[in-house]
Structures are given as C-alpha cells and as structure tokens.
Image (cartoon, helix red, strand yellow):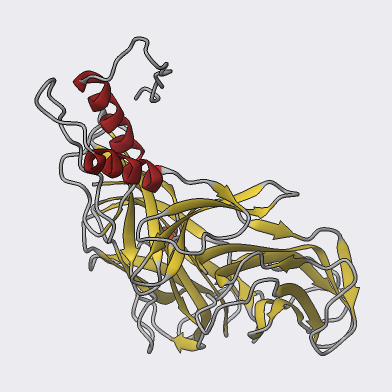
Amino acid sequence: MAQSFTKTAWIEDITAVSAAQLNRMEAGIYMASAPIVTVLPSTPVDGQECNLLADATAGIVWHLVYRSASGKWHYTGGLPMVSGTGRMSTASTGYTTLAGGARIVVPVAGNYRITGGCAPFINTTPQDAYFGYRTSLGDSQLIRAEPNANNQYAGGNLHGPPQATGQLAAAATIDAIFRTSAGTASYDDPWLAIEPITCG
Amino acid sequence: MQSFTKTAWTDNALPSISAAQLNRIESGIFLASAPLVTVLPSTPVDGQECNFLADATNGVVWHLVYRSTTGKWHYTGGPELYGYIYTEESTTSGAFIDLTTTGPSLTAPLAGTYDLEWNFRGYNTASQNACVMSVNIAGATPVENDGADVYAFGASTGYVPTAISRRRLTLTAGALVKAQYKYSGPIGGSTSYFMKRTLTMRPVVVG
C-alpha cells in the first residue's frame, strides 16, 4: 500500500539541503503525477497513477492507480466507452450480430463491467426478443422481453453481469447480439457500454 | 482550495532557495499526492486526495477528495460495489423475505451517503400481481414504495426487466444492505419469480 507523502518542515539555516531530501521530493512529485498515456507504464510502483487515453476519437480518458498487491491498475474515474444506435431486426432464433450493431474494441487487457440496453419489440405474441453481448468469454443475455401485444415496445436498460470469470485481452471485441424465439424481433437504439474495474 | 502556484526560478536571481520556498513545494507535493489507502487519513486538510480500497476482492478503488467545509471526503471516481445473482428463484410471500439465495448483499465500507441501485427480471403467475424487490438496510424492513417491480398483465411466464430503482441513503460503516422480495397485489397465493438480481452501491460523501 502506497504511503502518503510526508512533508519535511524546512527551517532556515538548520535543515540541510541534501541529495536524500531532493530525491524524496522528486519521488513525491513522480508519484503525484498522472501522465496521459496510450500504453500502461511498464514498471509501475504501488500507488502510481496514470490517465489512459482509452478512446482518442471520443476523448475517453480513464484515471488508473496501480496496486502492487493485485498487480493491476485500478479504475478510479472517467467515462464509459459507448457504442450503438439505430433500428435493426432479426428473424434468427440463434444469437447473431447485426449490421450496424454495437461493437466495442477493448483498449487494454482488463476486467470490465459491461452494460447495455434497447427498446425491443416483436411482431408475434407470445414470443420473446433477446438482446445481449458476445465476448471471448462467451455470450451473455442482457434483456429478454415478451411484449404483451404485437409490435409493442418492451424492455429497458439493465446492468449486465460482471465479467468475473476472466479478463478480456487487449483488442478483444464486444458485440451486441440478438435473437427471437419466433417471428421478427426489432430493436431501437441497442447500445453497449464498458467501464474497467482493473486493467493490465 | 487554491491551485498550486509555481515559482519561476532563475539562476543567480531572486527568489533564492529558502525554507519558505521548500515548505511551499512540500505542501504542493503533499496535496497532489493521492495515496492508495485502506483507512481514510485521520487529519486531512482541504483538497487532500486519496484512493480508497473499497473492495480488495473485486479490485474496487474510489478516488476521494476532502472538503474541510463539510468535513467529508467527496467521491470523484471509481466503480460501484456490485452484487449479482443470476439464478431464478421464487416466493409466494406477501411480506419481504430472503429468497433461497440470500441477497445480493453489500456492506458499506465507510460511514456516509451512498447511491444504491437495484433491479431484476421477473414475472408473476397472477394477473395484476407484482413481483417486488427492495432493500433491507441494517435489518430494517424494506419499503415497498422503494421497490423495483414487475406487474403481470396476464397469466404469463415471460420475463420482464424492471426499471432501475435508485435511492440516496445515509449508511453507517459496516451497514449491511440486502435485497429482499415479495409479491404485491389483489390475488393471494401467486408466485413471484426473480432472476438476474442486481444491487449496486456508490458513495457520494463519506467519513
């Protein structure tokens, strides 16, 4: 666990300037710095911080702090990466991706929280419209909606299950997936979002 | 809280290095530091920061900044604490109870004000009856009006996701927040089914 910076109380003509004192101050400045980086620092020390440019296009920066006990960078602030908009439909009864569907490319290896949502509807009752996401860890369902009348909207935004079974590799993709139990399921503005819990 | 004001040093010109200048630099370094801690610093000053390890198991760290006028640490970033139970379980109770798998439950790591959110997917076997999920705070009976709920429009086994219920509550350090469940409605004996039960906790101010 990183120690707090301990101040020296300098007294004129008593406290001597020394290499040790200057190195202590240099170390304090180094630990207090959180540079903007595109690659995580390679040899971090406990408590070191950085601001990772997760998505240069959208301007997404994640503030991370390194914990030596876990060997990971822990997320302490920023905005989620988000993808997805538009209306799409499927008659597939097996999960499938759709043209224009949400896709997020993981910027750095890590354990992520994935959320999503949409407004689904279906042209046949009583059938179900499904919406979820697919990663290298497998498929996960976010929404199963059974509208109570033809073409009536149902559903909403839900948290997804945590990615507790393993971490995603850098450049891994997260795709929105869709299926219907029968008939044609349609989706308005299906979106996915990710925030890291730990990286590295 | 003032920003750190830099001194522009020039060789062989004022200001010279002095105890006052070095103490100013020491204070700047101290305030810019945000150490990773498991216990909040005991004598903080205005603007001091820290990274608090809220949940070592799941790697959850909260970035906090101290504000002397409130005497509190204010949350400025980090993941929420997260509880999740996938398995479908049910109850016929009209009073809040635990399901077979208790929870999700979360413990407040610090005294403070927290934003809690919860939701699930479910259905009820009786038309016009509802499945209700609410939270038990440190043993107190949940409030039905705080509940996330699903109403059955007709005899159905189709899951419906609830809206996310959200409440801002003051909790003591170590307070256990536990989700509980019931049915609500005019028809007795119906069965409420719950799955994908989610509960999250994020601080607002602590300490």
Q: Residue at x 34, y 9 (%)?
A: B14
Q: Nearer the viewer, residue B192 or B38?
A: B38
Q: Nearer the viewer, residue A9 or A74?
A: A9
Left or right, A86 with reference to B32: right
- Residue furthest out toward the left: A14
- Residue furthest out toward the front: B12
Residue B165 in picture, x, y percent from top left: 49, 59
Q: Nearer the viewer, residue B161 or B14?
A: B14
Up-down relation of residue A53 to residue A123 (above or below): above
Up-down relation of residue B189 to residue B197 (above or below): below
Figure quadrant of the N terminus of chain B: top left
> How many discs appear?
0
Residue A32 visible in the picture: yes
- Residue furthest out toward the top: B14
Q: Residue at x 86, y 81 (%)?
A: A124
Left or right, A8 with reference to A166: left
Residue B59 in picture, x, y percent from top left: 40, 68
Residue B186 visible in the picture: no
Left or right, A66 with reference to A102: left
Residue A57 in picture, x, y percent from top left: 75, 49
The picture quadrant where one finds residue B46 is top left
Up-down relation of residue A104 to residue B97 (above or below): above
Q: Residue at x 42, y 76 (%)?
A: B182
The picture quadrant where one finds residue B33 is top left
The picture quadrant where one finds residue A153 is bottom right
